Amino acid sequence: MPRLGPALGRLIPPTPLSQRLATQSLLFATAEGTFLTGSAVFFTQVVGLRAAQVGLGLTVAGVASFLVAYPAGKLTDRIGPKRMWSVGALVAALMFAAWPFIGSFAGYLTMVVCFEIVENAAGAGRNAYILDVMPEDERVATQAYMYSALNVGFTLGAIIGGIALAFDNLAVMRWMPLFTLAIGLANAAFIWRLPRAPHDVRDPSERTALRAAPRGRGPLHNVGWMLCSLFNGTMWTNQVLLNVVIPLWLVEATDAPHWLLAWLFGTNTVMCIFLPQFTSRGIATLSDALRSARISGAFFVLSCLITMATHSTAGFLTILLVWLGHVAVTGAELYISGASWAFQAKLMDPERRGEYSGVAEVFSTLGGRWAPAVFTLLAMSWHPAALPGAGWLVIAGIAVVAVIGLHPAVGMAERFLEREGIAPGGSAVVEDEAPSPSLT
């Protein structure tokens, strides 16, 4: 096989198992990206919904997913992470077979709510499986490779979806979900063939390394973990800047050409493919993770300040500054990613990873679900005469508060585990099949 260039070579995970997990991420994102690219056309022109109905359905689905996040996490611990992940992936894939036959808001609402619940349950299994199966010193790096693969997959999905849209044919769009179904079934089969992790083993004789029952109290007693998840969710509102606020600002508050939006999202995609291994390098302790969170916060603030400045610029300078603001917010995304993976690896009870993931989902949602409305209002509507664009300073301040709050929250979560006699970490692969060949 010819040698890969240095940039591409860094995208290849170092171990067979991490390679398989990255391949799964690629499959999943290609399937999802294909459907998401054409979803606006599909929902409005094929199903016949109004834009407000699409938004309402997604909101209801988000609320439903929020309500079942904790029970789904507990179920993951009970049945095993790989089983939860693979079954959830299979059911989610099969649901795409029903999309072409939906023709009403009621059908759409039912489907989108069920789909969101199933996908989030599968995600709980996925997160717990990665932490369960990977050695402690490989968890952050493996998730960085998976993050790169996700972005490659979403890019491939966007290309495929774009080709379908180019036909400008509603019949093609109606049956496009079947393509996602086919890749989704391959993805579910791929997950099923992954090796078992310790918490997938059911035979008591094989569970000698595991406790019969979890020790200590669960995550709902761990105030530090709940606060850490809350502030971490606030840090992830960088995605609201990335996907909502900065694009709206570009269109309504600057003289930048609209084609710049494509360049912004392209830059983000390329950075998120090639840089996660770099930005997550060296994160081995909670102190490292907090340092990464501080860097993320600095990029978050820098993005707000740069974008705010474009309120009074013109021409090429505006284009350059808007682009730099988008680069900065991508830096915030990359550095909080590494910190988040380390928090998961270091602050979860190994016997309750699903339950901890469920609690994290609930509190991270509380920490960031309000941001689209609040950030949009601040950036687009609050312009005091003395300081135009001052809403950006408030947005930056929110990020600073979240970074500051993470530090005591992480300390509280760590001390809780110590008091309960819980040692985070620990993993072992339980091979039940022949190992797959290296993908390199």
Image: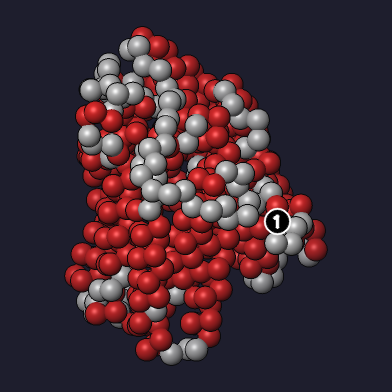
Q: Secondary structure at mark 1?
A: helix
Residue 121 lies, with reference to residue 235, above or below; the image says below
252 vs 131, left or right, is right
- Give amino acid for label 1: Leu
Task: Residue under label 1, please give it.
Answer: 8
x then y, percent, for residue 48? 30, 80
Q: Quadrant of the N terminus?
A: bottom right
Looking at the image, the residue that sits furthest to the top is 419
Mark 1 residue crowding within 10 angstroms, few (<14) / some (14–19) / many (20+): few
Q: What residue sits 39% from the left and 41% below the top?
A: 431
Q: Which residue does the image show at 28% across and 67% down from the upper left?
A: 94
In this view of the protein, can residue 364 be seen by the observer? no
Q: Residue at x 53, y 81 (%)?
A: 163
Work out whether residue 47 can be spotted: yes
Position of residue 13 measured from the top left corner of the image (x, y, whole percent):
60, 47
What residue is drawn where x is 24% and y is 65%?
111
Q: 401 and 236: which one is in front?
A: 236
The C terminus is located in which quarter? Answer: bottom right
